[in-house]
């Protein structure tokens, strides 16, 4: 394969990678779980509700009314967000409380870096 620096300028422009690199299989699978979890507008809204709540955490009882869904349905959405590593769950008595997971900003940053174009220098 021709090193990138040796490509003619016209070829470099048309054949340059669009992102920072190719993801390996494990990274792609992890990122796909995050995309899948955020692929539903209700789940995106739930994440934003939690992030905007006092202390960046919310009880499941406070999440049902804003999204207009039943508690079991919201619990299902929250389970998917938890499995994707976007939120963390803590049981307090009969109520579950959710907060943005400590690794979530990293997962969201991974989405951005995986799909963001790389900076190109003017020729």
Image (cartoon, rainbow, N blue to C red):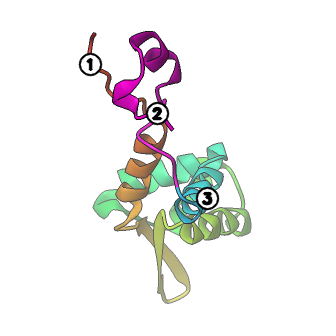
Is residue 30 rendered to the left or right of residue 13? Answer: right
Is residue 87 rendered to the left or right of residue 42? Answer: left
Q: 13 or 119, which is in the foreground?
A: 13
SS category of the residue bearing label 3: helix
Which residue is disc 2 drawn over? 2
Tag 2 and tag 1, C-beta contact below 8 Å: no
Give the x, y percent position of residue 61: 55, 67
Is the C terminus in the top left, top right, bottom left or bottom right quadrant?
top left
Residue for point 52% across, 52% down? 23
Q: Is residue 7 magenta?
A: yes
Residue 118 at least partly seen: no
Residues rendered magenta in the picture:
1-23
* Tag shown at residue 57: none
Looking at the image, residue 14 lies above or below residue 104:
above
Q: 6 or 107, which is in the foreground?
A: 6
Residue 18 at least partly seen: yes
CA gap, disc 2 to disc 1? 20 Å
Which residue is disc 3 drawn over? 64
Q: How many marks?
A: 3
Q: 58 or 79, which is in the foreground?
A: 79
> Of the residues under marks 3 and 2, which one precedes in the sequence?
2
* Picture quadrant where residue 51 is located: bottom left
Which residue is disc 1 drawn over? 121
> Of the residues under marks 3 and 1, which one precedes in the sequence?
3
Give the x, y percent position of residue 73: 73, 63
Tag 3 and tag 2, C-beta contact below 8 Å: no
Give the x, y percent position of residue 45: 54, 46
SS category of the residue bearing label 2: loop
**Image depth: mark 3 or mark 1 in front:** 1
Label 2 packing within 10 angstroms: few (<14), some (14-19), many (20+): few
């Amino acid at each position: 394969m021709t090193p990138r620096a040796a490509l003619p300028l016209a070829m470099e422009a048309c054949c340059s990678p669009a992102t920072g690199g190719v993801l390996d299989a494990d990274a792609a699978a992890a990122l796909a779980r995050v995309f899948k979890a955020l692929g539903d507008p209700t789940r995106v809204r739930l994440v934003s509700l939690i992030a905007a709540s006092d202390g960046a955490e919310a009880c499941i009882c406070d999440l049902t009314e804003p999204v207009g869904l039943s508690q079991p349905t919201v619990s299902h959405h929250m389970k998917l967000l938890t499995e994707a590593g976007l939120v963390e769950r803590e049981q307090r008595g009969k109520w579950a409380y959710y907060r943005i997971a400590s690794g979530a900003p990293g997962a969201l940053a991974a989405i951005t870096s995986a799909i963001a174009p790389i900076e190109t220098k003017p020729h």
